[in-house]
Structure formats: structure tokens, C-alpha cells
Image (tube, helix red, strand yellow):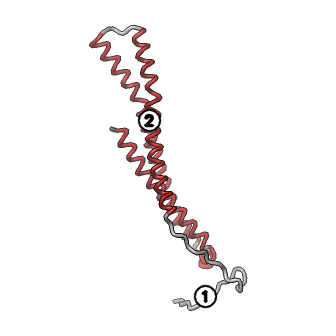
């Protein structure tokens, strides 16, 4: 139950992080596309600040995501050990005395249980990441492409031609 809620939270954080990365990427693409206007109006500092704010939010989401992955990994390591300790205590107190053979059998069983439990939690984590990635790719595929704006060949390089402009 705890592991499931952690994975759901990881899924949502992963989606948020990818949305921030997409926003940052589209802002950078806009800047590259309009670099002439940006340079002409000296908007570099303002745009760098905007992109930096998006990147800070993205880093915070990454930190939260890695923290939750660490907690999830710790739980996956602890589950078989806790089960083994509970079985030892119940067996010792209620059923029979433990012998070396019984302890070895139980430790082998729980050691063999560790790997499938870890792989299961890693698979759930990777599944959440894959779902978020596929949703992002789906959004990317549905984008409408725009015609490329070409420079006027009559103008000199670095010059601007403004028609019907109003400056106030």
C-alpha cells in the first residue's frame, strides 16, 4: 500500500518534471527562432531569467523524484528482512525452537525473495516513467507544424525592415 502510493506520487512528479522540461525546451526553441528580435531589443537577460526559473522548478521536481525513488528502494530492501524477522520471532515463540537447518532454510527463502521484490518495484517505477514519456511523445506528435519564416534576400545581413509599425 505504501509502495503503491509512492509509485503514484512518482508518476505525477515525473509527469510534472517532463512538462517543465517541455516548457523549457519550447522556450529555448522560441528564443533560437527569434534571436534577431531578442538581440535587437536586448531581451537576453529577461529571457535567461525566465528559463532559469523554469529550470529551478524542474530541479526541485527532480530532487523530489529521486528522494521518492530512494524511499521506494529502501522499502523494497526492508520488506523481506522484516518478513524474515517476524517469521523468526513467531517461529521461536509459538512453534518450536530454531535450529541451524531451519534458520538456513528461512534465510535462503527470504534472500531469494529479495530479488523479485526489488525487480517488481523497479518495474513499477519504470512503468510510471514510460507512461509519462509516452504521453509527452503523444503531445509532441500532435503539435501542428508551422511554416518556416525565411529572411528577405534583399536585406543586408543583420538589418531589420519594419513595415506598418507603430512605436509609442
- Residue 65 position, x and y percent, is 45, 47
- Residue 91 position, x and y percent, is 32, 14
Q: Name the secondary structure under disc 1.
A: loop
Q: Name the secondary structure under disc 2.
A: helix
Q: In this view, does 39 lie to the left or right of 85?
A: right
Residue at image point 58% right, 70% down = 31
Residue at image point 67% right, 83% down = 152
In terms of image quadrants, where is residue 116? top left
Q: Which residue lies furthest to the left in this view?
A: 94
Query: Which residue lies under the disc numbered 2?
Result: 120
Residue at image point 41% right, 13% down = 103
Considering only vertical position in the picture, is 137 above or below 37? above
In front: 46, or 22?
A: 22
* Crowding at mark 2 (Cα within 10 Å: few <14, some 14-19, many 20+): few
Foreground disc of the pair 2, 1: 2
Point out the image quarter for the N terminus.
Answer: top left
Query: Which residue lies under the disc numbered 1?
Result: 162
In front: 59, or 87?
A: 87
Considering only vertical position in the picture, is 60 above or below 75? below
Amino acid at each position: 500500500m505504501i509502495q503503491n502510493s509512492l509509485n503514484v506520487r512518482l508518476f505525477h512528479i515525473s509527469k510534472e518534471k517532463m512538462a517543465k522540461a517541455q516548457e523549457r525546451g519550447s522556450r529555448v526553441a522560441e528564443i533560437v527562432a527569434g534571436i534577431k528580435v531578442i538581440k535587437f531589443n536586448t531581451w537576453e537577460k529577461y529571457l535567461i531569467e525566465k528559463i532559469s526559473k523554469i529550470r529551478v522548478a524542474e530541479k526541485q521536481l527532480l530532487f523530489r523524484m529521486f528522494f521518492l525513488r530512494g524511499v521506494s528502494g529502501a522499502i523494497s530492501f526492508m520488506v523481506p528482512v522484516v518478513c524474515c524477522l517476524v517469521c523468526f520471532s513467531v517461529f521461536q515463540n509459538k512453534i518450536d525452537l530454531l535450529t541451524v537447518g531451519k534458520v538456513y532454510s528461512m534465510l535462503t527463502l527470504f534472500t531469494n525473495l529479495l530479488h523479485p521484490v526489488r525487480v517488481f518495484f523497479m518495474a513499477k517505477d519504470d512503468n510510471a516513467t514510460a507512461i509519462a514519456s509516452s504521453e509527452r511523445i503523444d503531445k509532441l506528435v500532435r503539435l501542428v507544424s508551422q511554416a518556416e519564416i525565411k529572411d528577405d534576400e534583399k536585406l543586408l545581413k543583420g538589418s531589420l525592415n519594419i513595415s506598418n509599425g507603430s512605436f509609442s
